[in-house]
Image (cartoon, rainbow, N blue to C red):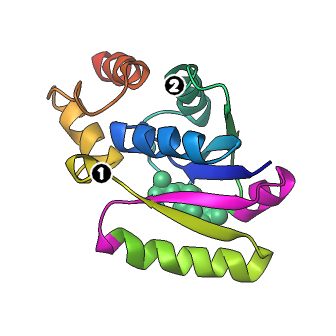
């Protein structure tokens, strides 16, 4: 039984993330999606609990997908969950440069390898930061995020 950890900020989860989770769910027996607190992204829009809730609703249709949240190192969570691999999505070469360094560091400090899944080209422009910005100014992001994320964005931006 192969278990993988898919960590991310997911602030909010978007359709590029959904594609990665759906692919991982076909490839592996157990997929754990973890909403992480990323200290380099201090001004999150949704709280960690809100992001976890949105993820739970988004992936409720996938039996082998579990949701958690975590506020420390990805590798600590991977070891705690006994995950065989970390999974990351790649949109472009720019992602690869940072993700390769993180994968190598994570492997060096924990022995856990990272597997990369390329995102489909029609989703490779999606980024949570840009989606937050469009939504903040009232733009339509309904084609970019799953329904639970859209509701969370609308609630947040109507306040
Ligand atoms: O790009 P994202 O979605 O903001 O990714 C967040 C995260 C934490 C998954 C990514 O930054 C990562 O893999 N970092 C590795 C270092 C680590 O474990 N950070 C945890 C927070 S201190």
94 horizontally vs 39: left or right = left
Using a 10 Å C-alpha cutoff, classify the residue at mark 1 as few (fewer than 14 neighbours), some (14 to 19) or many (20 or more): some
Per the image, the residue denoted by label 2 is: 54
Name above or below for residue 90 compared with residue 60: below
For image coordinates 76% across by 59% down, the residue present is 84
Residue 67, position as x, y percentages in the image: 66, 34
Quarter of the figure with the C terminus: top left
Check disc 1 and report its element: helix, strand or loop. Answer: loop
Residue 111: which quarter of the image? bottom right
* Mark sitting on residue 14: none
Residue 157, x across and y down, in percent: 30, 23
Give me the residue at 64% from left, 60% from top.
86
The total number of labels drawn is 2
Say which residue appears at 31% left-offset and 73% top-offset: 94
Which residue carries the number 1 mark?
A: 120
Q: What residue sits 51% from the left and 48% below the top?
A: 9
Q: Horizontally, is 142 left or right of 15 in the view?
A: left
| Image location (x, y in percent) of residue 137 | 16, 31
Task: Give the Cα separation between the discs numbered 1 and 2.
Answer: 23 Å
Report the magenta residues as a range: 75-94
SS label for mark 2: helix
Q: Is residue 158 magenta?
A: no
Specify whether residue 101 is in view. yes
Q: Is mark 1 within 8 Å of ligand 1?
A: no
Question: In this view of the protein, which residue sits in the foreground, 146 or 46?
Answer: 146
CB under 8 Å between discs 1 and 2 = no
Of badges 1 and 2, nearer the viewer stands 1
Q: Quadrant of residue 108?
A: bottom right
In the figure, 108 relative to 159: above or below? below
């Amino acid at each position: 039984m192969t278990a993988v950890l898919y960590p991310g900020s997911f602030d909010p989860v978007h359709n590029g993330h959904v594609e990665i989770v759906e692919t991982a769910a076909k490839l592996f027996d157990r997929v754990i999606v973890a909403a992480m607190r990323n200290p380099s992204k201090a001004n999150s829009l949704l709280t960690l609990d809100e992001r976890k809730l949105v993820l739970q609703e988004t992936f409720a249709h996938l039996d082998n997908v579990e949701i958690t949240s975590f506020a420390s190192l990805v590798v600590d969570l991977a070891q705690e969950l006994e995950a065989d691999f970390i999974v990351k999505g790649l949109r472009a070469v720019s992602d690869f440069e940072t993700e390769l360094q993180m994968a190598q560091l994570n492997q060096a400090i924990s022995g856990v390898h990272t597997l990369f899944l390329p995102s489909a080209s029609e989703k490779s422009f999606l980024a949570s930061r840009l989606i937050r910005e469009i939504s903040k100014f009232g733009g339509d992001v309904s084609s970019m995020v799953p329904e639970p994320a859209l509701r969370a964005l609308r609630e947040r931006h109507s306040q």
